[in-house]
Amino acid sequence: MFGAAGGQYGDARIGPSPVALRLVRPPALDPPLSRAELRSPRWLRLPPIGERRTHGIGYLLGQGLYLPPSSGEGREHPELARPDHIPAGATGTFDVRIGVRGDAVFAGYIREVAGISLWALATFGGLGARVRRGFGGVTFAGLDQLCAKIGESAEPSREHPAILRLHELVAERHSRPLPRRSSPRQLGTSTAWPAAPTWARWHIRQSGQTGSWPQLLHHAGAKLREFRAPVERGPEFSSFKRWVTREYTDAVVPTLKGDRPASRDFEIGSFGLPVVFGKDAEAKLRRGKDELRRASPLWIRVQQDPDGRCRLLYHVFEATIGPAGATLDLETRRRLPERLDLDETMAYRTIADFLATAP
């Protein structure tokens, strides 16, 4: 439905996608925000949390987007490193057109699948940077005009009527059996599985807490930072260096001293690879000479209830750590790489442990 070149799918309907999206009015706020407000928005000025003074929403943004307050650099408040963004609350308009004539059944199939795809994007994904950490959320009004099932339930889940309808549509059109609708095994208990995520390896958890989206992300970021860096090195270190990961103390520090790692378990890699330890070291996923990237399998999303309150939705796609033959190596200056260990069971058990404490 999104377009296909050649007859590789055995379908006479090939060529450009019959779905056309046209932006009529770009998302904007009325009145527009000032340049200063875009650079240092109010939602970024939440006070740090706990005795660690963690700026949770800044942690989720990451160093590439978040700039902490700095008197030396003339920043009274935290700022965004890239202030050009679509501000929260902006609205716009676009058209969805289905270019199918003379075949009402096929047009109906395309219309429903397009609507469900956009619904899934808004419910479980996002647009732009840091979408796995809560940003880039969008909401589409009017999708129930494409597929009526979209409006039947506001609760995002594996059993949402829109998802079940998608299964029915694809199974009927391509003469395939419906997928099994059993719940996946508990995170961290599975053995081998396919390299790519499957329906049976998709986990969903919705928070019971409600609040504004900045407050929820702020607390989620603080909890994630606390979970990933549990080791206290003492008050003699600066606030940024006082709390570190176990992997830093057990692997990076010994390796920098010329010793073997005290532990090769690399649980911090469960949240994505590579992992950079400042200028000291970097844990890289490699296959031969190729450096690979493994995006975090954990998604933190903001969901808005019909009454306007927000909740956090966490979902996880299980997959292999890397392709066959890939290795995880700790590379430091002037030292030979040290091999590290991370398998699927360890990775998803670690994520399950975080979800047990997440807000």
Image: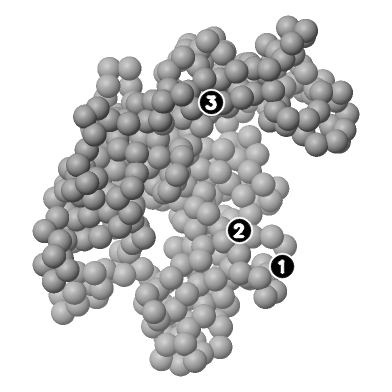
Q: Nearer the viewer, residue 354 or 282?
A: 282
Say whether residue 302 is left or right of residue 212.
Answer: right
Residue 354 % position (x, y): 39, 50
Q: Nearer the viewer, residue 252 or 310?
A: 310
Say whether residue 107 is left or right of residue 127.
Answer: right
Disc 2 residue type? Ile
Disc 1 residue type? Gly
Residue 90 % position (x, y): 32, 30
User: How many C-alpha atoms fall within 10 Å of the one at disc 1: few (<14), some, or many (≥20)?
Assistant: few
Q: Nearer the viewer, residue 41 or 153?
A: 41
Where is mark 1, residue-wise?
Answer: 325
Q: Nearer the viewer, mark 1 or mark 3?
A: 3
Locate the N terminus by quadrant: top right
Disc 3 residue type? Arg
Numbered circles on residues, count? 3
* Residue 181 lies in quadrant: top right
**Spatial distance from mark 2 to mark 1, Cα to Cα?**
11 Å
Residue 123 % position (x, y): 46, 29
As helix, strand or loop, the secondary structure at mark 1 comes to loop
**Spatial distance from mark 1 to mark 3, Cα to Cα?**
44 Å
Say whether residue 336 is left or right of residue 305.
Answer: right
Earlier along the polypeptide chain: callout 3 or callout 2?
3
Q: Nearer the viewer, residue 356 or 245?
A: 245
Where is mark 3, residue-wise?
Answer: 22
Earlier along the polypeptide chain: callout 1 or callout 3?
3
Q: Can you see residue 356? A: no
Query: In this picture, is 90 found above or below 188?
Result: above
Where is mark 2, residue-wise?
Answer: 321
As helix, strand or loop, the secondary structure at mark 2 comes to loop
